[in-house]
Every structure is written in C-alpha cells, then in structure tokens.
Image: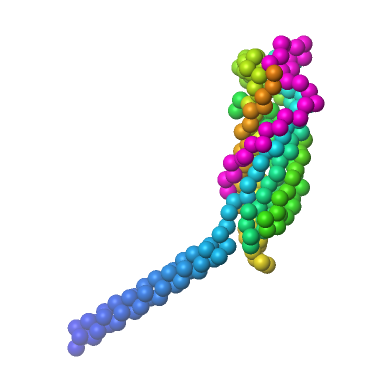
Amino acid sequence: MAYDCEKHCKKKRIKLLTLIGAVVGILIFLLLLCILIIWAVLRPTKPTFLLQDVTVYAFNASVPSFLTSNFLLTISSRNPNRRIGIYYEDLHVSAIYRNQQITLHTLIPRFYQGHKEVSVWSPFVSGTAVPVAPFISTALNQDRDVGALPLLVKIEGRVRWKVGNFISGRYQFHVNCPVVIKFDGCPPSGDGSIVQYNVKYQVVQRCHVSI
C-alpha cells in the first residue's frame, strides 16, 4: 500500500510539473508573439543624422601642443517612423581630430521629434588652447600640404520612444559623423592656422547611428 501510494504521488508530481512547464511555455510563446506583432506593426527604425556643413572660425596651434578650434555645425536629424515619436535628452556635441577631442561638449536642449519629422540644429563647438599630443603638430602640417582636414563630429545622449501614450525607458545613443573638409593648401602662417576663417564648407555627410 505504501509503495502504491508513493508511486501514485510521484505520478501526480510529474503531471503537475508537466502542466506548469506547458503553461510557462505557452506564456513565453504568447509574449514573443505579441512582441513580434508589435514590431511588425510599428517597424521601429533608428533616426537618421546628416552633417550638412561646417563653418570654421578657428583651427590653429600657435602654441606647441595646444590646439584652438571653433566650428559652427549644421546638423539635421529625421525620424523615419510613422507611429513612433522620439524624445531626445542630454544631447551633447563635440569635435574629434586625429582621435583626440579638441572641443568642449556643447549641450543641445531636449526636444521631441514627431512622426516623419525633420529637425535642424546649429551648435557651436569650440576649444581654446586644448592640450594635444606632440604628433598633432606634424599632422597639422601634413593636412595643410594635402588641403584636407579630417574631423569626427560626435553626438551622444539618450532617447526615449513614444507610442501613443506609452513612453519607453531611456536608451543611450551615439552618432558619429566623419567628415573631410577640403580646402586649397596654404603656406604656414604665423598663428599656425591651416584653413581660411569664417568660411562655410558644404560637406553633406551621412552619420552612423547606434542605440
């Protein structure tokens, strides 16, 4: 009798565990199915960024190992989604030269971008007497001779997605805009400058976005 009872209880436990496993499996399947349906309906797509032009007000190394630069950038962003809005928060822009940050972070006020909406910013980024590696002076001379100035414009911040009344959590996002400003080579000047000042260079460079 004791053996039969233990055997019967064991079968019941197996059936119960099987039932629990089946229920959990069905719930997971339904959750994944809901996610798939939502994705198929919304088709979420990352925003696109375009660096349109760069106005150079200063770019020189009058003091060895110290670089001064001032740029006015024109950047446009587009939300390609039809049903998803985007909140941009804690945005800041900076410029990189030869893998070294040469400007301070310029903050952009938070804003909301609606469906299929395009936004245009004109941030001013600058850095005065920023210490740089010694090889930068050599790179400046090479760029002067070639007539091309390679820069990387970086945009970093956080985004939130809005679907109807639902607003998601915050996601870090990074935008890299590599650009080469082409100009006529000029002889070395007394202040170490290599490009003409107060000149707007049309670049129209598509940026890489990661979230």
Q: Where's residue 7, x and y in %?
A: 22, 82
Q: Residue drawn 73% across and 23% down?
A: 59
178 drawn magenta: no
Q: Where's residue 126, x and y in %?
A: 75, 30
Side of 34 where 135 appears, left or right: right
Quarter of the figure with residue 181: top right
Side of 163 where 109 appears, left or right: right
Q: Where's residue 144, x and y in %?
A: 67, 16
Q: Where's residue 156, x and y in %?
A: 65, 43
Magenta-colored span = 185-211
Nearer to us in this view, 181 or 101: 181
Q: Is residue 58 visible?
A: yes
Q: Residue drawn 43% across and 69% down?
A: 29
- Quadrant for the N terminus, please: bottom left
Quarter of the figure with residue 5: bottom left
Q: Is residue 127 visible?
A: no
Nearer to us in this view, 158 or 17: 158
Quarter of the figure with residue 145: top right
Given the current orientation, which residue lies at the most extreme right position? 198
Q: Residue drawn 63% across and 50% down?
A: 47
Q: How many marks?
A: 0
Nearer to us in this view, 49 or 11: 49
